[in-house]
Image (spheres, helix red, strand yellow):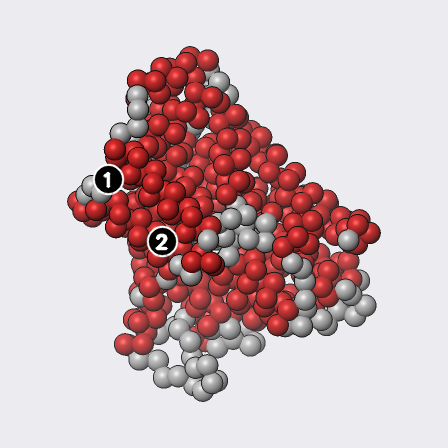
Amino acid sequence: MESKINFRSAAKYAAPIIVGLIVFAMGAPAGLTAGAWIFVSIFAALVVGLILEPLPPAFIGLIAITLSVLFKVGMPVVDKAGKAVTITSGSAISWGLSGFSNSIVWLIFAAFMIGIGYQNSGLGRRIALFLVEKLGKSSLGLGYAIAITDLILAPFIPSNAARSGGTIYPIVSSICPMFDSYPDKNPRKIGSYLCWISLATTCVSSTLFLTGQAPNPLAVELAAKAGVPTVNWTSWFLAVAPVGLLLFIITPILTYYLCPPEVKGSPEIAQWAKEEFHKLGKMTASEIAMASISILALVLWIGAGYFKVNPTTTALVVIILMVLTKIISWSDFLANKPAWNVLTWFATLVPMAEGLKNVGFLKWLANMFGSSLIGLDVMWATLGLLVAFCVLRYFFASGTAYVTAMVGLFATLILQIPGSDASQIMIILLLPMGIMGILTPYGTGHSPVWFASGYVKGPEFWKLGAIFGFIYLAIFILVGIPWIEFILPKIM
């Protein structure tokens, strides 16, 4: 038995190295340089390492970025004017550490700190007890409560990291301990279930509204600049509503069966929560302060465009106010290991994902897919482009970077399909962007928050992501595409 365990452990350590060496040994294909292929090899090893987790994910990311810096691969080789850039050790390390200046990385970090504020103040426990009291008779009911909360916020908070990480996470992280469910103790009791619902429903709401996530309006703008105008807010919602609302309804049920909670809910739990809630009495000064800070954050997040305040700036303001009001101490700030862990992890993935674009791999991959689609029937070409557009999400640690790199390129491919409605095909590609964030633990702003919570471990996270991604995409193809092509034009 011990030898089997040792062999399995050794295989986990060896697999990323072996995969990286195999990819490297295959040699760079036509259109890519040797340096680009070295980076692709490192990235392949990184993905395998993140799936198997022989080491902590953040440490694996640190290894990958360090190797890239040592080999001086992954960073831009031309400037904005198209002139060749000489890569030095200084410019390489600057690129390698650039993820630590990324605003989304710090927003995710701040979400963990806000969670500590909810715990320390007692506000998270109060809200959690209220939800368990009202809906705790059923674990499925709790799932829908979380989903509905996110749905209400989605049209107004375009940062899904702020919405899910800053608002939903602190509540969920307070509910799980009430059922004796922790990341390292009984995670399947209810924690895994609630965390996956929180992740998945935010992906759905990010698709349902044009303002559900920041990359959506950016994608529409970039598509228009590339010569393929698409939709406005209302048209986006009408185009995706049948699929989005269906996915919203079935996601808690799917999670209930694919990531089942051991606790199904009980009248005793609900009654206990009711008694505990009444024992809390009136809100304390700390709870009132935390509630006031949260309301301020929601106002600034919702009105980010009006107030001209970046969501990450708002999150940093929240941290400062929590420290000043003594909801958290500076020691709490420094001792929040999950927050610092996710900061390191995601800050290494951002430049690694950007590196795929820098070395030309994504353009080469998209062109390879595209060249095989041009001679196909419009329907099959559309399906091929849609699948390619979604699968490429595996290579990005940011929805914004994904949109920036891919939308213009795919718009060019769409315009090459004879006899097609370019705008219609473009919207078919853009609508599933939110739901495809489910694929990886780094694919969208809120994913690292739920992955780093520890309730859904690495291999299970990737497996559930693939299963949900397949189901979501299949429903979009079967329901969404016929709706967009045949029914929607008749009612607009």
Q: Is residue 217 above or below residue 151?
A: below
Left or right, 120 with reference to 447: left
Q: Residues within 10 Å of mark 2 (few under 14, many from 20)?
A: many
Side of 286 where 186 appears, left or right: right
Instruction: State the image coordinates of residue 474 (x, y, percent, origin top left).
Output: 67, 45
What amino acid type should be assigned to the residue bearing mark 2?
Thr
Q: Nearer the viewer, residue 339 or 28?
A: 339
Location of mark 1 (residue): 327
Residue drawn at x 40%, y 55% is 311
Q: Residue at x 72, y 44 (%)?
A: 479
Q: Is residue 83 above or below residue 10?
A: below
Task: Quickly name the residue at label 2.
Answer: 314
Q: Residue furthest bottom?
A: 83
The amino acid at mark 1 is Ile
Determine the residue positioned at 68% across, 62% down: 230
The N terminus: image quadrant? top left
C-alpha span from label 2 to label 1: 17 Å
Q: Residue at x 26, y 44 (%)?
A: 322
Residue 449 visible in rendering: no
**Residue 348 position in % (x across, y down):** 35, 60
Give percent across and percent down for residue 326.
Answer: 20, 41
Q: Position of residue 29 (x, y in %)?
A: 54, 73
SS for dot 1: loop
Which residue occupies the foreground of this view, 186 or 412?
412
- Camera sees residue 489: yes
In the rendered structure, which disc, 2 or 1, sits on the residue that comes first in sequence?
Answer: 2
